[in-house]
Image (spheres, rainbow, N blue to C red):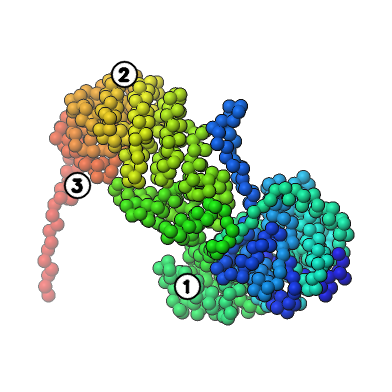
Amino acid sequence: MTTSSVVGQVHLLGVRHHGPGSARSVRRALEELRPDLVLVEGPPEADDLVAFAAQDDLVPPVALLAYQEPKAVSKRTVTPDGTPPAEPDGPRAAFWPFAVFSPEWQAMRWAARNDVPLRFIDLPAAAHLAHRAASEDVPGAADDGPGGAPDEPRPARVDPLGALAAAAGYGDAERWWEDVMEHREGGAAVFDAVEQAMTAVREGEPTDPWDALREAHMRQSVRAALAEGAQRIAVVCGAWHVPALTGPSPAATKDAALVKPVLREAAKAKAILTWVPWSHRRLAAASGYGAGVESPGWYHHLFTVEDRPVERWLVNVAQALRAEDLPVSSAHVIEAVRLAETLAALRGRPATGLEEASEAVRAVLCDGDEVRHALVRDRVEVGDRLGSVPDGVPTGPLERDLAATAKRLRLPREALARDLDLDLRKPTDLGRSALLHRLDLLGVQWGELTGTRGKGTFRESWKVAWDPRLAVDLVAAGTHGSTIEQAASGAVLAAARTGGLAGLAALVERSLLAELPGALPGLLDAVADRAAVGSDTDALFEAIPALARSLRYGDVRGTAPGALRQVLLGLVARARTALPGAVTTLDDDAAAILVPRLREVTAAVTLLGAEAGLREDWLAALERLADRDDLHGLVAGWVTRTLRDERLADVETTSVRLSRYLSRGTPARTAAAFVEGFAGGSGLVLVHDTVLLRLIDEWLVSLGEDLFVEVLPLLRRTFAQFEGAERRVIGEQVAGRRLHVADVVPLDPQLVAHVLPVLATILTPTISCPQETS
């Protein structure tokens, strides 16, 4: 295809992806040319989706999502050779994002509303997905980043905007592009200049192999359109590709031979395309998107505001700052406008740009505060605008189920993070909680559980924010089922086939929170199987608290506890049997890990109350450990304290055990570990039991200087865990005992003589003299 073959019939509109100036120029050029066919750089599988662009409820930013269905999960627990089944492959997926200021979007809107056919002319989406998988590059028609065949080195491609900006004397390509394109509105004529500029830039530059494939397919698509009889064709593509479509080009047979293998492979792996919501934050270059722009919020403003863009922009910034309770007045805005316009005039720019507006915002509206300016950058220049798609857009079953469920629960998908407080006694809030927990099990992180509020289990706090890329996670989750509930149950059971005992217990708890009764029988069978053959005592101790919480609070969500109770009873019995061996021959690190686990198990069985005698049996097992000589000091101290708290040991018995570990024959570090285990976490026992406090105090006083220095770090760590009020009361009690026991700290009469005058000065009341009257 030569230049002469396109004159008068094919009009090349070379654009910058996501440029408001390019978008305005494309819209005006189409009105001038009135083509009978529009060709756009993009995946041809999306041709049937163009009609949705005419609908007002397809609101950008949106993206074309292309994906291939992942393989389904095997239902077998093991493969024929006895190994667990492989995890399902995640979906291959790629996005072609569009904002309202994207030239391709404006071309689609114009074609759809003027009943002009529009086709996409890039390589099929399946080819892009295969290329991405092979080269680990992010593909996309909206991404003109360098590509390349997977087995060939990719030549470094010149930055066309950077080269043109440098030729024009600009040091910043963004600033040059704003001056020549974004602040102007041209028609078809402006694209002749773009073609000449890009031809000069590409002259002598090597062509990337991946670009060569794409451009060959574009030429073939244009040839096909001409052969079909189109009289006026408008081609909207990245400016970089324009010289390849207008200059001397290879013969059609050579282009066909080049792309034929790629098309053959793409036909074997069909891609599914649909519209999905996108966001300005995902359009930003900082997100890692290859064709991203620095400030999508600013570009959206430039494209949508008819007059006084700078003044209106600074008003928007002022509103964002006021929303954060930051003082900004009308006078601030007026001064910022003056400063921005003055800076633009001094720099000789055709219009005030973002650089000048941003400097005015920093200096005037933010008072030079970089933190405030960063807020403006995040909330206004980039922004959280999220698009939407109409109900009629074809979607996968999980997406349809999620949309229907979220609508029923009045839980809109928003890009801006917000806090969500749920009262699980309310049906709607309970449904929201179950949905978020189910999505979490599927790896779709719409919400993050930040904690519970108040007492009991009736309140949850979430931080929710919808990221458009979660659409891919939904596709991947589709291997487990066609509804959110089915998929979450399937994902849980798939994880149960290879999970350990502690992980299975956590899955049981999460499944109860997600209200997945269908998954519980299989999960509990897996827990019982692992417990029967496993010998990991640590995993056993980790599993019991999660299962106990599940059993104790299952009634909050209406869960039948029968099978879970039986499993838990068996686990506690196994833990009780394994306890004597678990506390033997522990070093410091192992003891530090074991004690918190034992504390959680004890709290769990206490939580269950009189459930089949679990609490009494467990405490009896601890009581049998109390007087063993081979316990680590930390474990011995915790056991002694626990028995005392549970009233299974009186003050006298506790004092005997304490005295044994704090005697002179016990190594100082062992005694300090005992004190840490005994008093760790709470000092109330020492506040209320003066006998135990006296024993610890006397042991501490009896230490020599070297031993005291050795155990001091351990003791400081122990007492640092106490509440401030507890430390104060303990200090007052010890100080009071010092004053009443004269032989504890003998006083030196000479030192006392030096102190008494100072005390007298401090304690003597000040004598005030009346002022003399005149």
Q: Quadrant of the N terminus?
A: bottom right
Amino acid type, callout 1: Ala
To which quarter of the image does residue 420 belong? bottom left
Give the residue pinned by disc 2.
629
Determine whether 415 is above or below 113 in the image: above
**Nearest the camera: 308 or 269?**
269
To which quarter of the image does residue 738 belong? top left
Give the residue pinned by disc 1.
318
Determine whether 199 is above or below 310 in the image: above
Determine whether 529 is above or below 276 in the image: above
Which of the two marks, 2 or 3, is nearer to us in this view? 2
Q: Is residue 141 left or right of residue 378?
A: right
Quick one: label 2, few (<14), some, or many (20+) residues within 10 Å?
Answer: few
At 62% across and 68% down in the image, what residue appears? 53
At 34% across and 37% down in the image, what residue appears? 561
Q: Measure the alpha-carbon separation of dots 2 and 3.
A: 53 Å
Q: Which mark is residue 47?
A: none
Q: Which mark is residue 758?
A: 3
Instruction: Using the rendered image of the protein, determine whether residue 606 is visible from the camera's viewpoint.
Output: no
Q: Position of residue 259 (x, y in %)?
A: 80, 53
Amino acid type, callout 2: Asp
At 27% across and 24% down in the image, what residue appears? 620
Question: Pointer 3 and pointer 1: residues touching (CB < 8 Å)?
Answer: no
**Nearest the camera: 464 or 741?**
464
Determine whether 460 is above or below 15 in the image: above
Mark 3 or mark 1: which comes first in sequence?
Answer: 1
Mark 1 or mark 2: which comes first in sequence?
Answer: 1
Amino acid type, callout 3: Val
